[in-house]
Amino acid sequence: MSEDNNQYYFNFSFFKVDPKWRWMADLAKEESAKEVENVINNSGIMFRSYSNLGLRDDADFLFWFAAKSVEEIQVVIEKLYKTVFGKYIIPSRTYLSCTRPSIYVQEQKAHGFVTGNEPKKHVIVYPFTKTREWYLLPKEKRQEIMDEHIEVSKKYPQVLLNTTYSFGIHDEDFMLAFEVDNIRDFQDLIMDLRETQVSSYVKNDIPMIVCVKKDIVPLISSLG
């Protein structure tokens, strides 16, 4: 593993909005949105916001955080709950993971999120767990299977992958976040990957949550 200074904890926090929020005066909602924006911008940790509005029944929006410690993430979420808007939101799904180098890839690339690059229009987020049989295979066999997987992925350079690890700190093995402008490109990638050997060692890869990039103020304004 590389130096800890290059590693981050990722937190994917999905929320539902209390219907009572929609009854608030528009001016109050606008001021509340700006309050949330200030709290998060002043937190000093990396952040992106996305909308799930109308796309799922278990989440209205995603706040995606990256920080050097889990305590930093807790502090900013604590401050979020203390805002006016924070009184009207309910966590529906929360995932925790951390960055670390892949043992199957020779050329390590920084995660798109932490490089500070402009985010793509969408991110598809999902937990991923492989079977125990996978981990009992010889390292050479796993590398062979992953090489096939990696070659298929290279056909889709427009799809940017953020792979993080949840072993021991959450319920799944990995958290995957695929950034893409055209959602159909991601669908094509997944359909191709279903035909690779590694798919037979997948225990779980749901839910797959499509998220649309939206800044904080317009995101909150869109919630009614």
Image (tube, helix red, strand yellow):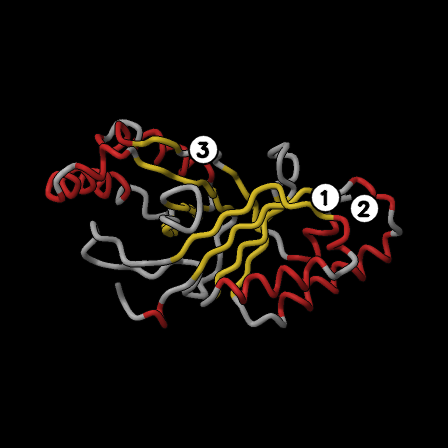
Q: Secondary structure at mark 3?
A: loop
Q: Is residue 25 above or below residue 53?
A: below
Label 1: which residue?
17
Mark 2 Cα-neighbour bin, 10 Å: few <14, some 14–19, many ≥20: some
Q: Quadrant of residue 142?
A: top left
Q: Nearer the viewer, residue 74 or 192?
A: 74
Mark 1 Cα-neighbour bin, 10 Å: few <14, some 14–19, many ≥20: many
Give the percent coordinates (x, y) of residue 22. 82, 44
Q: Nearer the viewer, residue 82 or 169?
A: 169
- The answer to whether residue 161 is visible is no
Label 2: which residue?
21
Give the percent coordinates (x, y) of residue 43. 60, 70
Task: Tell me the quadrant of the picture where the C terminus can be found.
Answer: top right
In three-dimensional space, the C-alpha distance between marks 2 and 3, rounded to whole angstroms, equals 30 Å
Sequence-earlier tag: 2 or 3: 2
Give the percent coordinates (x, y) of residue 63. 58, 53
In three-dimensional space, the C-alpha distance between marks 2 and 1, rounded to whole angstroms, equals 7 Å
Amino acid tagged 3: Ile
Sequence-earlier tag: 3 or 1: 1
Q: Quadrant of residue 74?
A: bottom right
